[in-house]
Amino acid sequence: MNQAPGLSHQALQEYLAPITDDLPVEDRQRLFTAWIRRTFHVDFTESSLNNQVYLSPVDNLFGTILFEFRSNLAQEHESAQLKLVERISGLKRSSPEAFFTGVATDGVHFRLYAPIYLEDGISIQSLHLVSEINLSEAQEATSIDLPYFWFELLLSGFFKQTTPVSPEMISFNLGVPSTCFRLIRLQLDKLFYAAKDVPAVKLRFEEWTRCLTLTYGPPVSAEQLF
């Protein structure tokens, strides 16, 4: 496949080498943002505040991305999630129409979260874990494709040029297990449950259930399929 010029096993190892257990959070942030710029040649607006990095593209599936850094994500993932909830809620109040996603990371392990909002559309009920990747495991793999696909999708709104696609990239980015599919599914679920009692929606749902019954026999759980 056609990869970003700076992405290779050697480049990944060079990035990970200085990230030791005692490396300060600020240095983890610095190494990560430098690696992203160097590897993917992206141009983004970055702002940092209290262990967080904000990346804001003009147009991106993930909207404004908040990276919450920790020294050890395995031990501090709960506090990272709480801080993401706090910061995303605050930003959502200031920009109700904006879209936000959060990434908890220690520079090696990355966990991508989508906020699930309450009815007011601002307060966060929970964070939904959409996808995650551990670069220390990726560097042991025979192929570097997985981390490339993961970050390519995450940073797609920042690329000046589109990377030539491959069947593997299409499947990873848009297939049923993909991050994109999961995010869209969350939005569709929200829309459906908000409108399920509308007569026109109820009628379509009943017709859909009837079609499933005719096709598969006994009624099946149809809401997720719908």
Image (cartoon, grey):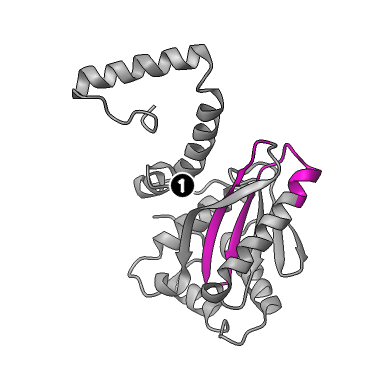
Q: Give the residue pinned by disc 1.
A: 164
Taking the magenta stretch, the answer to whether it contains residue 102 is yes
Decide if residue 178 is on the left or right side of residue 142. right
Residue at the image point whose x is 41% and y is 60% from the top: 146
Quadrant of the rendered structure where residue 39 is? bottom right
- Does residue 192 appear in the picture of this structure? yes
Residue at the image point whose x is 57% and y is 72% from the top: 107
Decide if residue 55 is on the left or right side of residue 76. right
Q: Is residue 50 above or below residue 159?
A: below
Residue at the image point whose x is 63% and y is 84% from the top: 23
Q: Is residue 43 above or below residue 69?
A: above
Q: Is residue 216 above or below residue 162?
A: above
In the image, residue 121 lies at what x, y percent?
68, 38
10 Å crowding of disc 1: few (<14), some (14-19), many (20+): few
User: Which residue is at the far bottom?
Assistant: 22
Amino acid carrying label 1: it is Pro
In this orientation, which residue lies closer to the viewer: 108 or 167? 108
Quadrant of the rendered structure where residue 24 is? bottom right
In this orientation, which residue lies closer to the viewer: 117 or 49? 117
In the image, residue 100 lies at what x, y percent?
66, 47
Q: How many marks?
A: 1
Span colored in magenta: 90-119
In the image, residue 199 lies at what x, y percent?
51, 12
Quarter of the figure with the C terminus: top left
Taking the magenta stretch, the answer to whether it contains residue 225 is no
Residue at the image point whose x is 61% and y is 47% from the top: 125
Describe the element under mark 1 as helix, strand or loop: loop
In the image, residue 153 lies at what x, y percent?
52, 50
Q: Is residue 180 above or below residue 66?
A: above
- Does residue 43 appear in the picture of this structure? no
